[in-house]
Image (spheres, helix red, strand yellow):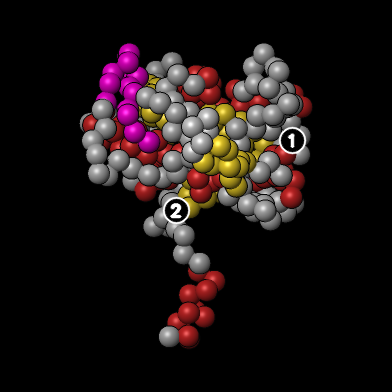
Amino acid sequence: MRILITNDDGITAPGLAVMEAIAADLAGPDGEVWVVAPAFEQSGVSHCISYIRPMMLQKMGERRYAVEGSPADCILAGLFEILKDNPPDLILSGVNRGHNVAEDTLYSGTIGGAIEATLHGFKAIAMSQYYNRGNAIMDDPFEAARVHGADICRRLLADAKWHDQPYGVFYNINFPAVPADQTKGIKATVQGQRPTGSFGVEPHIAPNGRRYLWISANPENTSSPKGSDAREAAENWITITPLRADMTAHDVVSDLSELF
């Protein structure tokens, strides 16, 4: 199996090394693992691409490249330059440091990389590791992802739906912030919604008197409904959420037709 990896935390991120280990397990001794990751952290860039400027591509080692761009840029570079003659069988994005649940999925560069892969007809899985007091002090904060990631991917590859519709399915996996043996199990979930949203701003005055705004995060995942990715992963389940890039509100189309 040939596997392409990207992330949004950058090519030196520890979570990327975890994903490389997962990919090596999946690919097997005769497989190939290719890394095409952002040269610098790209958290929160969503599905953006460098449409109005070029992106520098630098070879960092055997089957390892850094791109001055977003995760979606990395997927484009991987598919249409680096692996243009030998396309991958699977694309993995992550392992993100921190969760990507509820509204986070709309902001996440990790999810953006998986979306770009799916738009080109490839199987894609995004992985994120909850990160808080439950695992921040562990020797390996990514232990849950490291231990369980490859097996979950195998099960998805064997039996899950993928390109059953024009906008194919990709899978968003979130690992809870506990040791691997303390996860409660695996749950299929829907994308959650926090009543107060994901982000706000905090104003600060710089020493020169200028006003700046810092983005502040809302960590209230347990306010999301039961059965959602945010709620269940916060309660120590590994969550798998099937997603599509189709943003059509299908339930509203018929009403809109009657209106016009």
Kindly report the secondary structure that dominates the magenta region of the rendered protein. Answer: strand
How far apart marks 1 and 2 lie (CA) works out to: 27 Å
First reached walking from the N terminus: tag 1 or tag 2: 1
Q: Position of residue 156 (x, y in %)?
A: 54, 39
Q: Please indicate, yes or no, whether residue 22 appears anywhere in the rendered image.
A: no
Question: On the image, which quarter does residue 124 sit in?
Answer: top left
Quadrant location of the C terminus in the rendered image: bottom left
Residue 220 vs residue 124: left or right? right
Q: In this figure, which residue is indicated by the disc labeled 1?
A: 236
> For residue 116: magenta?
no
Q: Is residue 36 above or below residue 247?
A: above
Which element carries disc 2, helix, strand or loop? loop
Is residue 68 a member of the stretch shown in magenta?
Answer: yes
Residue drawn at the location 65% of the way across and 32% of the way down: 130
Q: Secondary structure at mark 1?
A: loop
Q: Label 2 is placed on what type of residue?
A: Ala
Give the residues drawn in magenta, as a range. 57-70
Identify the residue position indicated by label 2 in the image.
Answer: 245
Q: Position of residue 12 (x, y in %)?
A: 45, 19
